[in-house]
Image (cartoon, grey):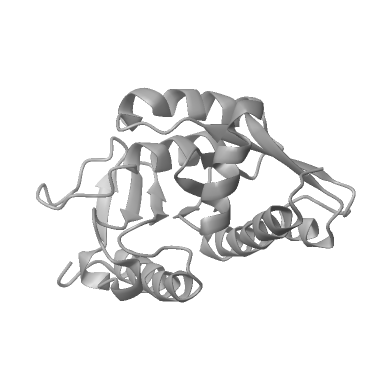
Amino acid sequence: MTDAPPLLADAAARLAEMGRDFHARGWVLGTSGNFSAVLGQDPLRLAITPRGADKGRLDPEKVLEVDGRGAPLDGVSRPSDEVRLHLAIVQARRAGAVLHTHSVWSTLLSESHASDGGLAISGYEMLKGLAGVTTHAHREWVPIFENTQDWEAAAPAVETLLRERADVHAFLIRGHGLYTWGRDLAEARRHLEVLEFLLEVVGRAGRSA
């Protein structure tokens, strides 16, 4: 990413900073997780983390730009294996940023609630940190999708659900972790912090509402 355009360089620096923070919190250990930020809508361009990168030591120079099909613009770099999911979220929700973590609690709850197809959370003040939520009495539904190694084939189902359920702020992948998004990186980060907090609370309490 030498001499990268300003938009890409700025997004890469912010994604790298988030990687260090989330790694320190135990949310993206090893090479887990992936992050993206929209650089342009017409044509669609994303800055996205590379495949197999340690997010705690993410080099901004390795963050790459992909087009609306997930192809790297430099024709060489390898984006996250889940780039198709990022594109599905952006296209369904007009999101400006997408964040994916592999925390302990998101992984455990994605398994324990998989048979229900999702996890409901209500009654917590922290819910008001989610866009459009104004009361702790809100009931947040977090869908759970089965994991796969072929997101090219599976992502359309995710996109369809997100178009049908405008109230959803996130989803879990079974045995895999949490995806959330926002209109920009700041909102996506806030959603991630809120949801990781809530998932840990629900997990420790041993219940959902």
Q: Quadrant of residue 109?
A: top right
Q: Quadrant of residue 58?
A: bottom left
Dividing the image into 4 quarters, which one contains the N terminus? bottom left
- Compared with residue 179, is residue 145 higher up or lower down, i.e. above or below? above
Dividing the image into 4 quarters, which one contains the C terminus? top right
Of the pair 134 and 40, the residue shown nearer to us: 134
- Compared with residue 42, is residue 48 higher up or lower down, i.e. above or below? below
Left or right placement of residue 146 versus residue 134 in this view: left
User: Which percent across, then down, holds residue 183?
Assistant: 57, 53
Whether residue 179 is visible here, answered yes or no, is no
Of the pair 71 and 204, the residue shown nearer to us: 204
Q: Residue sitting at 31 percent across and 28 percent down?
A: 152
Of the pair 51 and 198, the residue shown nearer to us: 198
Whether residue 187 is visible here, answered yes or no, is yes
Left or right placement of residue 192 versus residue 74 in this view: right
User: Which percent across, then down, holds residue 71?
Assistant: 21, 41
Left or right placement of residue 38 versus residue 31 in this view: right
User: Which percent across, then down, holds residue 114?
Assistant: 58, 32
Q: Residue sitting at 19 percent across and 47 percent down?
A: 72
Q: How many marks?
A: 0
Of the pair 37 and 21, the residue shown nearer to us: 21
Q: Residue sitting at 38 percent across and 66 percent down?
A: 11
- Compared with residue 197, is residue 108 higher up or lower down, i.e. above or below? above
Q: Residue sitting at 72 percent across and 59 percent down?
A: 201
User: Which percent across, then down, holds residue 39?
Assistant: 38, 55
Going by the picture, which residue comes out furthest to the left? 76
